[in-house]
Amino acid sequence: MSDWPSIVSMAVPAAAGLIGVLIGAWLSETRKGAQRRLAFYEQQLSGFYSPMAGLRDETRMLTELRIRDACNGHTSCGKMAPT
């Protein structure tokens, strides 16, 4: 029974170390999961909104050309409101 204090004095630091490693692994995995989610969202947004912005610019350019051609150079025709 005299070995009990020495066993406890070795087991407590070992258990604390194991718990620390487990907490560190859990935090690391949580962070990696969040990074993967954010990367996925960024990919989805850039894949959708970049082409949409290009289509918007193209539509605006075609609208301005159509208005200019319809007016045939008249200065009072087709004034567009600034956006």
Image (cartoon, helix red, strand yellow):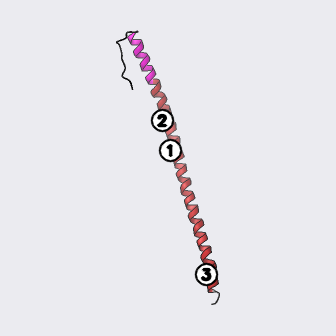
- Taking depth in this image into account, of 40 and 60 the one nearest to the observer is 60
Q: Earlier in the sequence, mark 3 or mark 1?
A: 3
Amino acid type at mark 3: Val
On residue 8, the disc is 3
Amino acid type at mark 2: Tyr
Q: Mark 2 points at which residue?
A: 49
Q: Is residue 80 left or right of residue 53?
A: left
Q: Mark 1 points at which residue?
A: 41
Disc 2, SS: helix
**Horizontal and vertical percent for residue 67?**
40, 16
Residue 6: which quarter of the image? bottom right
Residue drawn at the location 55% of the way across and 60% of the way down: 27
**Horizontal and vertical percent for residue 63?**
42, 20
- Mark 3 vs mark 2, foreground winner is 3
**Given contact means CB atoms under 8 Å apart, are the residues at marks 3 and 2 in contact?**
no
Q: In this view, does 28 lie to the left or right of 59?
A: right
Amino acid type at mark 1: Tyr
Question: Within the magenta stretch, is there residue 65?
Answer: yes
